[in-house]
Amino acid sequence: MHASEPADGDATLTSEALLFTELFPIRTEGIGRLYAYAPIWNGDGACSGAKLAYHLRRDLGGQWHWLDGRLITDTPPNPARVLITIDALRTEHPALFAALTHIEEDLHWRATPEAIAAFVMRGRLADLDGHFVEALARAAGTIKNARVVHEPYARTWVIGGQPTLALAVITRVLYAQDVTAFASALPDVNALTGLAVVEKLAGDEGTIVKVLGTVAEQRKRLLQHKRLREWMGMATDDMLALRIAVGSKTEDYPANALDLRITPETASRFDVIPGQVERALQLKPDERARLVKVIADIAKDAGLIGDAYSQRNLPEYFKQVTPRLSVVWGNDKIRPYDPRSSSADFAQHGLYQCAPRYQTEPLRLAVLNAQGDVADIFVEALAREFERAHPVRLKVTRTRAVQVLTPENLQTAVRALAKADADVLLACLPDAAYTDPAAPEQFLKAQAVGRALPSLILFERTLHDIEAMPRIIMGLLARAGNTPFIFEEPLPYADRIVGLAIRRTAKKGSDDLTAIARYYGNRGLCQGWRTARALVSAGAGLTSEILAHLLPPREINARRVLIHVDGRLDKADAQTLTDWEAAHDAALYPVEITAEDVPRLYAFANRRIELPARGAAFTISEREALLFTAAPPLAGTPAPLHVRCFAPLRIEHVLDSIEALALLHHGAPSMPSLPVTLLHTDEWKTALERGVFPDATAGETAWWL
């Protein structure tokens, strides 16, 4: 695709940006009628419907897929041929189909948009996969000692009742050497741990967590897994067997089943140029849109999809969300909020509200110093500025010098500083840490977040920036429990906004469930946080004990509580929230905010494809939207947030709440992509995985800033 064309290929050049998506309507006129069949089993011997669909597709022809608990096909079979096929399946695969008696057409079934989209994606679109891979291979580049691989990726959506496909491209950088050759050059094969890999056939990504030994030592056990038998047939006895973490699970593989996947974090461990790896993975908007067009054109030529949804063909679905709020600073000074002037407004007017304790006590600061004398001089200047211009005094309770930013050193330093009885941790890092693939800033933040320790991380260039001082002081004060400003008018659609994050870890027959809630009033005043942890039966939702701690009846009774939920809300959790709402005369408005696996938005302006402006939104329905919230500096093509609400709220109000709560990230150099109600949730979950958990179950300070 030329840089002067949008993804649907027929742009009209204008001075204004034309927004378009990676979402393509399915051309239903070419699908025909779909039929549903229910398998009838003798007794309780039912097996996988997906396996049955596979065999029917092979033996009867046409498309057969297991959807909505039914066998769905576009080719109704001859009844006599069905009986012959079932008899053959019972004979050839008795372990699977001995209990299958027949399949019966479900005359009451009607194809929903969701079912149509899934049927097309699993069938006719999947049949084009070879063409997609071939076309993307022609568009792939090469870098030193590695190959860049682009793979097609599709998901189903429904837009305005229309079955829709989201088409995207996954990019991987795979090392030229195989795992065995790479391991042979290592002084210790255990150095493989921590490297990313991808399973060659299924494409599953994971991380090596353990070297199990040789294939000879593991062969008998590995051969028990059918998925590995082909690879085991080609594996030599001296080849390594590896344990791979895939999500929350682990799988074992012979080394020949895996490719080494290079990431920006691990690039330094390979003979590659890290900058080339980063550029290959962080595709610019025009590059990514060009690759999407490659696969979209093939699907269009096959008659499967139409042009991508855009402002041209669906203008009423696109909106711009830009809250225009006035805020109240110190001395009740009211100013229109502008992130570009907020530091100056704070310097001129001061805090809206100072926490009572700081009227008599200093703000206690613990300092992690990775900048030597530069940081020492900065902290002295910071203390003088506090004394000169603000009613709160500053006191450094402890300083910890860190020479080398390894995870071990940072963890030790944070653990020590957490005991320093400080209100805020200030970390001063070298500029090199900002671009370090090992991401010491993120690791450091995760350590602080896991301990509910408020922290502010500064890089060397900021320490030398005199104009940044008001922003830094505002950030420290806010993290210590003070309020720089509040909204002049309360948000009209809620009395309270809560951020809810839930993490489940499967145990034997149970789930280790941890939940955290953060609270804000409808004028932006931080009201603290609470966390709860319990062992629940597998698949169970939030317990009444957890909800009593996170959403006490006295705080929700007769109130409208808008709940920003991190990711998808489990059905069991949604039901317990509904029951809790009914039991306590509350109005709970849960809103899912998902940042992963979301179709991208693009803007076509000035004869090129670029990112849309912050606040660009594509409203899928009255309850669902995509909202672009990324802010510069940006790398690659960030995806928007997928927002879905369950309660009778206008989607405009839901989107407004996200952008309004993003304004409260006091002291940040730019607005975050998430509202403060969900900020640094990933770091919180990472800390939990490492066994880091706060001693307290509640608090008042916003450690997530």
Image: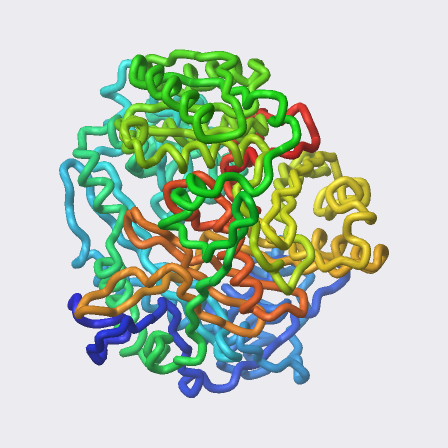
Q: Position of residue 457 (x, y in %)?
A: 41, 29
The residue at 53%/39% (across/down) is 351
Q: How is the image coloured?
A: rainbow
Residue 329 shows in the view? yes
Residue 228 shows in the view? no
Q: Position of residue 272 (x, y in %)?
A: 18, 33
Q: Is residue 8 left or right of residue 664?
A: left
Q: Is residue 679 above or below residue 430?
A: below
> How many numbered marks appear?
0
Q: Residue furthest right?
A: 583
Q: Is residue 195 left or right of residue 331?
A: left
When asked about the image quadrant of residue 108, the answer is bottom right
Q: Position of residue 235 (x, y in %)?
A: 34, 33
The residue at 27%/14% (across/down) is 187
Of 50 and 507, which appears nearest the observer?
A: 507
The residue at 40%/65% (across/down) is 616
The residue at 37%/37% (across/down) is 233
Of 475 and 573, which appears nearest the observer?
A: 475
When asked about the image quadrant of residue 423, the answer is top right
Q: Position of residue 303 (x, y in %)?
A: 33, 81
Q: Quadrant of the N terminus?
A: bottom left
Q: Is residue 367 left or right of residue 42?
A: left
